[in-house]
Amino acid sequence: MRGLFLYGLGCTNEIWKEMKSYLFNMDITYVEYPHEIIKEAKSTSDIASWVFDKYRHQDYDFIVGHSMGGIIALELVSKFEMQSDKVIFIESNIKSAGAFYRNLLMPKNMEEYGEKVTRMIKREIEYYTGSLIESLQENFDYSEYIKGTESNIFGIYGDRGVKNYTNRIIDLNLDDEILSRIKFYFIEESCHMPMIENPSDLYLSIKDILCET
């Protein structure tokens, strides 16, 4: 199967490092946004436009996007009409989510991964415009991209170490129409970076999604 992977704001393809050993038997393209592109991008649409222009000539069975990358993935199949059967977004906020979802790493993982992850984000965030950052932090609603596509949509989130938290869907602040379009998966013992905190379980969820007909 052929997949396209898109990382989030302030990240690099380094976030997929642990995942690659699980995905070795798939044809995966890991997109890297050039700094000269993100330095000019005022919104996710500007990055999505660049991705579309570069990768539209290839067919992808699925598109995976982390955080901002998930919004870009949804834009590709909705706004840009890129063909892909499945869109898998990881820790993407379609609308501003509740406090439950506003943490980077599990406390126990901060000691091992915290410095490396925060250093990456601080380094890369300097290349992004204030307009783009604001568009992902304040008064946003990307529901239209879900309404505008017939692709199958899957949302993956970390469970924040609270396996049976009853409000984990409610806290996403999505209306019933949007919720009905998304099949949700939750990765145990992880927060915003499940590909780093629990790559094996993330892989199993992606594998399960890809096996769905």
Image: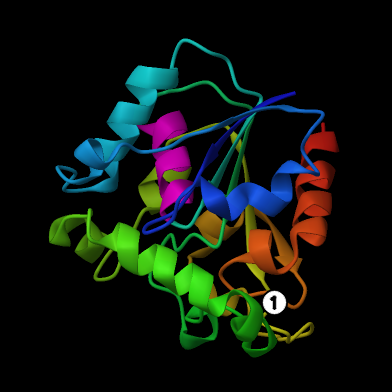
Q: Which residue is mark 1?
A: 159
Residue 195's image quarter?
bottom right
For numbered disc 1, what is the local secondary structure?
Answer: loop
Where's residue 52, x and y in %? 37, 24
Mark 1 Cα within 10 Å, few/some/many (few <14, many 20+)? Answer: many
Q: Main secondary structure of the magenta part?
A: helix
Give the residue at x 47% y 39%: 73
Membership of 11 in magenta stretch: no
Is 174 placed above or below 53 here? below
Give the residue at x 50% y 77%: 115
Where's residue 165, x and y in %? 71, 86
Left or right: residue 89 versus residue 12 is: right
Give the residue at x 32% y 58%: 124
Is residue 147 visible to the viewer in this orientation of the structure? no
Q: Nearer the viewer, residue 108 or 187?
A: 108
Where's residue 112, x and y in %? 65, 79
Circle 1: residue type: Asp
Where's residue 163, x and y in %? 78, 82
